[in-house]
Amino acid sequence: MQTPIDRRRFVQVATGSSVIALAGCLGGNGDEQEVTGDDDHGDDHDHSDGHGDDDTDDSSPVGSDGFVYAFAPNTIAIIDPAEGEVVDEITDGLSEEGWGDPRITADYSEIYVIRESPSQVLVVDTETREIVSEVDVGPGPTHMYHPNDDEMWVHSDDEGTFYVIDTDSHEVTEIVESGLENEGHGKLLYHEDFGSRGYATNVNDPGVPVIELENYERSDFIEFDDVDDQGTHYKAYSPETGLAYFEFGDETVVVDSDSDEIVDRLDVSGGMYLSPDEQVMGLLDGDSIRFLDATSEDSDELGVVDVGEGPDALRYHEGDDALYAITAHTMTDEASIIDVEELEAVETVDIGDIERPEGAHHLHRTGVAGGGYFVSPADADGTVPIVDVDAREVVDHVEVEEGVDTVQYVGDSGVGYSGTLR
Amino acid sequence: MARARSLAAAALVGLLVASLALALVGTPVAAHAYLSESDPANGEQVDSPPDDVTLYFSGDGVVNADVTVEDPNGEVVSAEPEIDPDDTQVVRVPIDDAAGDDGMYVVEWEVLADDGHTTSGSFFFAVGDEPLDRDAVLEAYEDDEGDETIPPVEAGAKALLLVGVVGLLGIPAVATLAVRPVFARADATTRSRVDGRIGRLLAGAAGLTLVGAVVLGLARTTALGPLSLETISQFVETPLGEAWIAQVALAVGLTGLVAAAARGLVAKRASSVAAFAGALAVAGTIAWTSHSATAIDRFQGAAVDFAHLLGAGLWAGGLAVLALGVVPAVRTAKPDDRADLLARTIERFSLLAFVGVTLVVASGFVLASWHVPTADGLTETAYGLTLVAKLVLATVALGLGGLSRFVLLPRMAADRRTETADGSRPASTDGGVERSSRGRSVSTFVRSVRLEVALLVAVVVLSGVLTSAPTAAVAGGDDLVESTIEYEYDDHVVEVTAFPAADETAGETLLLEADEPIVFEATFLDDGGEAVASDQPVRLLASSDDGTEFEVELEETDDGAYAVVQPLADDGIWELRITGAPEGSYVSEWIAAVVVPADGHSEDHDHDDHAEDHDHAEDHVDDHDHAEDHVDDHEPEGHADGHTDGVEATGFQILLQFGAVLTVIGGVIAVALESVRVRGGGFD
């Protein structure tokens, strides 16, 4: 029997996007930004009229290209980063929400975002800026993936399953068992190179389940070690080499995606983030960021940049003169801008502060890049700072609401492991 | 004439005083001792066995408690229960140190309340993290079906006692104030006959009082164990036993007094006054231990109950004197005096009867407002049904009384005047003596008054039953009902059931009670009505409007359903979600639930008003508004804690209180008019 949890208190603790006590993960990954959605319940809930921003009474298209959706407990603020202001808000039906992963569809028409309680995925139409659906999913949803144009795969950590949502009907059409123990925090690694397969991770499983995406089933399991106290977590893929990378304990296991054979084991581990040009992969290693050659079969290390203060959420920006990586720090109110070619931090900027609950094992701070900006919400300040990466400066601290902890850019955010949305 | 005036003045003053007392009465609640809450609470899950279990009763205080706690192995792990000396509504039961097993602990309790009635029940709590077992919970609920049986011996003894006391109150009062002054004009033989009959009536009433009191006490003693000297001695040490001893002592004294009077050892007037005083004292002991005194307010409740008894005594006891004392005696009087004696006695008695009827009806309204707070209580409980029967009989008796007073009495008086004027009787055409109209009036009156007495005796007997039954304010709460809602998905149906529910569901909203372990079941049915298994765990997510949320997994049962036992801690609006994957098809259904405080359910639920869909947030908000209205409808009706503070009267209670006030006003006017008439020489 579960003990009832005070929802408000739960939300306060668990949301702090910034601060997560969940197996050290929650969005810090390259391909995931943490967001959450909320709304009404019901798998058949149709938000054809009730929701929507306060300023757009009808559903006339207004668009959201280049805007940032910032998710706060009681509002979804739509921010124009160029102007540094909130241009619209969605508030109807939102109350003390806790958000999980957001994911935008390939055509940028809809944002899917996890509403932690009561285990739902909220669908936001970016044209009309309205919540158009809420989809009930399994308990403990944390991460969401968009392996093809027609589906969103939501991982239910309490079940170790993926709930597959049809992006047309907004209904759960399949439930795919992934974890071996029917529970555990998990992720999905997919690239078009994999065909109809994907790799899942699960913090309870000593390896990666192989998922048949078209048959909606776990077809195989690549065991990394015969242990029962260690699982897999972060993942990445390098299209240049066909190698898949999986965090496993304090090492990173490298798997050849053609043969599913383990080809290497790196003695470092952490979140991995591929650059948009797919040439470099940044790996968070404590207070340092290790940049690996993503074109090297041996995963050669290009260099280490020591940024200190708990870097998280590595994002990239291809500037006119260089490739930049930006990371938000969890232990300070700063972000570091790194010249990847020079392998040095060239600037630190003040991006506001995050909540750091006492006793939290892991702190997390999400961020998203797009349109030349780096955006990372400061939930303690209730602001969304906008960093102009080329100018290496914060151009605005947009006031949203205390607790704002999740963001999604509408457009090519270039944050995926492959440089695309997948 | 002077005595008549003083009688009228005394009646009017007495009625006004009693009416004022009634007007000050509040609107409280229950009776018997009923478990209102406990620690651990019913269905509560605790980490380890508590040091003790505490039971909090509403209604009456507890005189004696028998409580056992059984561990999951069925072993009794409790010690002797202790009644809190500072608050007898609280009983604590120490738990054996050795108890430590995880699982369900069952608490069985039986208590003897201040009002002499025994109530019993059971509840359970769980130790450890394991969810409560559905079957065990259902079994516990089955064992806890309400005990609303009426103990026959106790009810019978109480009926005897009440009949006796009513007689002892009414007989000497009416004999002294109405009969003897009139019969003082009669011949010695007639006086002697009427005195003899009154004496025998008193003896009978005293005997019934004594027998009733003794048997009632012994019957209550059995609540402590098999009847024995030991249990009797235990019983007399309780407050209830002390009242019983006083009652029996008074009954013995009254019996002795009546016997002495019968032998001429005590003057008639003195013995009547003493008997009336003794009867008042016995009535006081009854009122002091009544439902009203113990559950409502000791003094207020006792006063109203006392007024009810006194009114019944003046009416029914006095009528008994008329029917069984005066009428037979009048038959032996001189023919010319018969109607005159009877009419004059009735005139004097009428004044007392008006006072008695006013008191009994007004106090009856107040008692009903306490013990039958809703109209449904009249038809859905044994108490209510008995009360209805009593009211019907009393109404018929009242009608007969009205017939006697307003039809037959004036007719007899008119006949008396006519015959006195011409000094003759009409002769029969056949040469015999034709029966006079006066004779017909007397005969009709005699039949009417005898029937009225019989009806009133039945009413008093029913009162004995009534005072032995749980009042409607507390009865009926144990009706365990199941509420089921069905939803269609594809070609299938998901059936969601909650047990126990506060009400059967008529719409799409479950009406449940807070803190009650509720067995939730979900069954997926195919188009053939067969249960379908879920490929994924079936879960219940519950979310309250104040932010409490939890999600639990249901276990598959033998009959293909999925069940979990889960209390909902907060009253208010909840939304429940059942999810599962029958035959691989994902199903998620939302159900609105209104959770009311324990025992706070009432009628008139409009389940269709709210939460019919969840299309979007605005609708949702509206739904909540409706549902909150719904909650307002379900505020406790006043028997949750047994205290009067802050309890709002129901419409039915207000109606009854209004009836009491009207009765008092009407009664005062009637007595005043009757007084004027008596002072003016009545029907002379």
Image (tube, coloured by chain):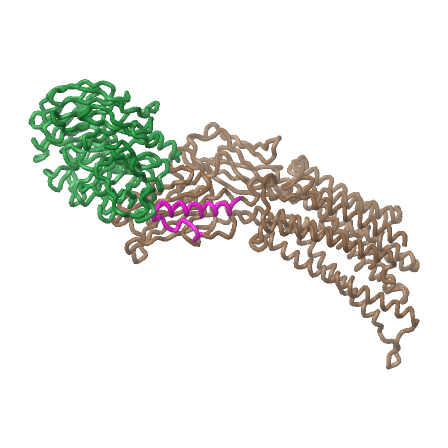
Q: Main secondary structure of the magenta part?
A: helix
* Membership of B627 in magenta stretch: yes
- Residue A354 in the image, given as x and y percentages of width and height: 31, 25
Q: Which residues are magenta?
A: B607-635
Chain A on-screen colour: green
Q: Can you tell which quarter of the image residue B27 is in?
A: top right
- Residue A157 in the image, given as x and y percentages of width and height: 27, 36
Q: In this orientation, which residue lies closer to the viewer: B433 or A262? A: A262
Q: Is residue A9 above or below residue B475?
A: above
Q: Is residue B322 above or below residue A418?
A: below
Q: As drawn, is A123 to the left or to the right of A261?
A: right
- Residue A181 in the image, given as x and y percentages of width and height: 24, 36
As drawn, the chain in brown is: B
Q: As drawn, is B403 to the left or to the right of A57?
A: right
Q: In this orientation, which residue lies closer to the viewer: A362 or B431? A: A362
- Residue at 26% x, 22% y is A350
Residue B225 at least partly seen: no
Q: Is residue B561 above or below residue A359?
A: below
